[in-house]
Image (spheres, rainbow, N blue to C red):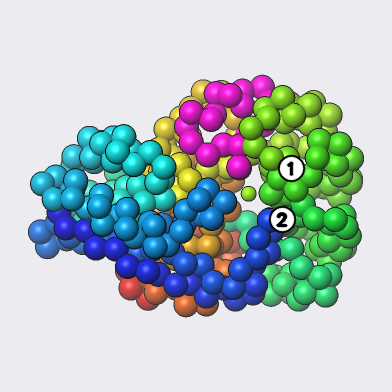
Amino acid sequence: MKLTAEPLELRLRHTFTIARSSSDWAHNVLVRIRHGKHEGLGEASPVSYYGQDQAGTIKTLREMGRVLAKAHPFDLERVLAELRRKYPKHPGALAAIDLALHDLIGKLLNIPLWKYWGLDAADTPRTSFTIGIDSLEKVRQKLAEAERFPVLKIKLGVPGDEEIIREVRKQCPKKTLRVDANCGWSVADSIRKAKLLEKLGVEFLEQPVPPGNPAALKRIKQSIGIPLLTDESSVVPEDVPKLLGCVDGINIKLVKCGGLRRALQMIHTARSCGLKIMIGCMIESSVMITAGAQLTPLVDYADLDGNVLISNDPFRGVKLDKAARLLLPKGPGLGVVPA
Ligand SMILES: [Mg+2]
């Protein structure tokens, strides 16, 4: 197999702001792995919060490519284990290779990944659409643009954010609302603000406090009336058992856990712990969003809107029906083709 890695610059429709960062572009990486007449596609969406960037990811991927030179796509388990051992700090680069190998396996077998895993494409959930932090006027404009989405994920975690969620509920009295505070609150903030969220009928609260403190999550869970999910606290499969009894569910992201194989491990571990599961994303093209979507028949919630937030997606794959339910492609592997 031969690997190539190149920059993939994705332009945001709106400046995207969360509790800790703001951006107009996502500097992703596109990976192509060639095997005979087939090409597998992969992507990484490097996360600065985890010390990842585009240049470092490309450099690592090119080094990783040497391990692939003598391997076959069906060596996936061995190749990924070896790469994880050699590059434990590069889950984004690993995810890109994991995606491309899965894409190749599907193409060699000529079946889509969801079928390869024995899943029913009719079982996909609706995806939420994310509203980043902004002025009330800008939030109103974004809500108007998000009219077709019945489920919204509202980013909070900054001073005065109660005004944002009140305004969203006023503008959207019927929609399902989810709140992600991206570690922006204290335990006391979380318990106090969750009362308002409960009153406004918010479906769940995601990661209100910083990671590394399951006891804090447990105190919050025991004191609030809506489900508590983690994201920054549930990065890799090994994090999941530590959250047992402390939260109601976890958010899984391919770029953080290291790809589809690790995501499957997280899904099964979380199910064994009685947790709900969401598949989420960063700002990503249809390559990585479609990869995440392939797993969604196994989960409760999807937050796979990264490709909808950009204006220059070079690919197409998963689509949305009128109710924003994910429609999985029927093509082999990831089922992603050039736009
Ligand atoms: Mg989150």
Q: In the visual, does 82 lie left or right of 284?
A: left
Q: Position of residue 281 (x, y in %)?
A: 53, 54
Q: Position of residue 48 (x, y in %)?
A: 54, 55
Q: Nearer the viewer, mark 1 or mark 2?
A: 2
Residue 157 inside the magenta-drawn segment: no
Judging by the rendered image, the residue that carries numbered circle 2 is: 19
Determine the residue positioned at 35% across, 64% down.
30
Q: Quadrant of the N terminus?
A: bottom left
Q: Which residues are magenta?
A: 231-250
Task: Classify residue 88 by image quadrant.
Answer: top left
- Secondary structure mainly formed by the magenta segment: loop
Residue 240 inside the magenta-drawn segment: yes
Earlier-in-chain disc, 1 versus 2: 2
The residue type indicated by label 2 comes to Ala
Taking 294 as reference, is 318 above or below it?
below
Secondary structure of the residue carrying tag 1 is loop
Task: Classify residue 174 by image quadrant.
Answer: bottom right
Q: Residues within 10 Å of mark 1 (few under 14, many from 20)?
A: many
Q: In the visual, does 299 lie left or right of 142?
A: left
Q: Which mark is residue 78?
A: none
Can residue 276 be seen here? The reply is yes
210 and 301: which is toward the camera: 210
The residue type indicated by label 1 comes to Pro
Judging by the rendered image, the residue that carries numbered circle 1 is: 208
Q: Position of residue 117 (x, y in %)?
A: 33, 40
Determine the residue positioned at 22% across, 35% down.
78
